[in-house]
Amino acid sequence: MTKPLSDKVLNLKPSGIRKFFDIVHEMKDAISLGVGEPDFDTPWHVRDEGIYALEKGKTFYTSNAGLKELREAISKKVKETRNVSYDPNGEILVTVGGSEAIDVGLRAIINEGDEVIIPEPSYVSYTPCAILSDAKPVIIPLKAENEFRLTPEELKAAITPKTKAIILPYPNNPTGAIMEKKDLEAIRDIIVEHDLYVLSDEIYSALTYKEEHFSIVSLPDMKERTILIDGFSKAYAMTGWRLGYACAPKEIIQQMTKIHQFAIMCAPTTSQYAAIEAIKKGDDDIKTMRNAYNQRRRFLIDSFKKMGLECFEPYGAFYVFPSIKEFNMTSEEFATKFLEEEHVALIPGNAFGDSGEGYLRISYAYSMENLKEAISRLDRFVKKLRTL
């Protein structure tokens, strides 16, 4: 065996996030603000349903698409939040987190050589998943002066005759940016005119602070060309339960389910029973967590202003994306030096694409105590850099 590995896989860049996790675990008194994971425990009533399912021996495979009761609950929730109806029997697929939905969604619609537009900075798996589906990723570098929103001009410039789809990563990880209704209306006609498909990753849809999230699928003529992705990890603090879902036209869901069937079989059964409880009775839990995140968000934005660190105000997810361009260091150099000297882990912006260079991702899914201590150390570090 002279060449056992796939060139396509070998050429994928590893995640730029893991390096800092590995270092911080070996440091005493280190604070990590790098993980995109709620610091809340899964609500007790949700955990109870998972425990009850185990006690009752509900540990068998479900249907490939997921439990019917869960798909019906998802259909009802999407109707309430997006005013769009999806048939639970054919237009909804329960997946292993939103990440699997991204993967199988792209593989279901892409032919070799198709181009997929990916606005960046954005979630680290979009480009690898596009490559693994034999697509050519076409990157749109988003700009801080536009609050990292996608503009019609940027979208038009990226479209070619080979463009098949666009990924809409809003609310955004890592920037916290959102796209409001007016922003989505501005790009909708372009999408329809060029007959593009949309993969709308809305995993942070429940965590917005300016106004309620608006989905592109709610606009005219968009349901039939959109794969809507959401899940339970962020809204219900269920990251380890590994549960997400996709809503799309029946012909797309059918092919996504086929891939899911061969690769996964079904999402975890215990998680599905817990998710039914979460989606039916978890609105108060979301409100409690969202209020706490909003308090932390406002604390960080105010702290950056006081220390003179440039940062646009994000209105979604639980991240801030301050600029460190004034220090003439790469984002990785800044993050590494800060970790070594002050024992605080932040994620370099370029881990989320080249357009993230010069920024840092800071997660505020942490206690106020940890955030205050981390910001105190950052303030000290920034003052030191400015005196050099």
Image (cartoon, grey):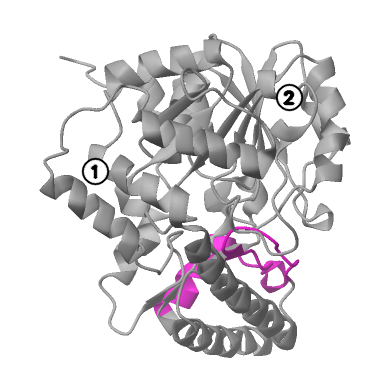
Amino acid carrying label 1: it is: Thr
Q: Quadrant of residue 109?
A: top right
Q: Position of residue 111 (x, y in %)?
A: 54, 9
Q: Whole-percent x and y of residue 225?
A: 68, 19
Name the residue type under label 2. Answer: Met
**Label 2 environment density (alpha carbons within 10 Å; few <14, some 14–19, many ≥20):** some
From this view, report whether residue 112 is shown above or below residue 87: above
Residue wearing tag 2:
222
Towards the viewer: 320 or 182: 182
**Residue range of the region highlighted in magenta in the rendering:** 311-340
Q: Tag 2 or tag 1, which sits nearer the N-term?
A: 2
Q: Which element carries disc 1, helix, strand or loop?
A: helix
Viewer-proximal residue, 152 or 244?
A: 244
Please say if 279 is above or below 33: above
Instruction: Give the CA separation, mark 1 to mark 2.
Output: 33 Å
- Quickly name the residue at label 1: 270
Which corner quadrant holds the N terminus? top left
Task: Identify the element where label 2 is drawn.
Answer: loop
Q: Taking 60 as reference, is 171 left or right? A: right
Give the residue displayed 67% in from the left and 78% down from the top.
298
Q: Percent position (x, y) of residue 332?
A: 52, 61
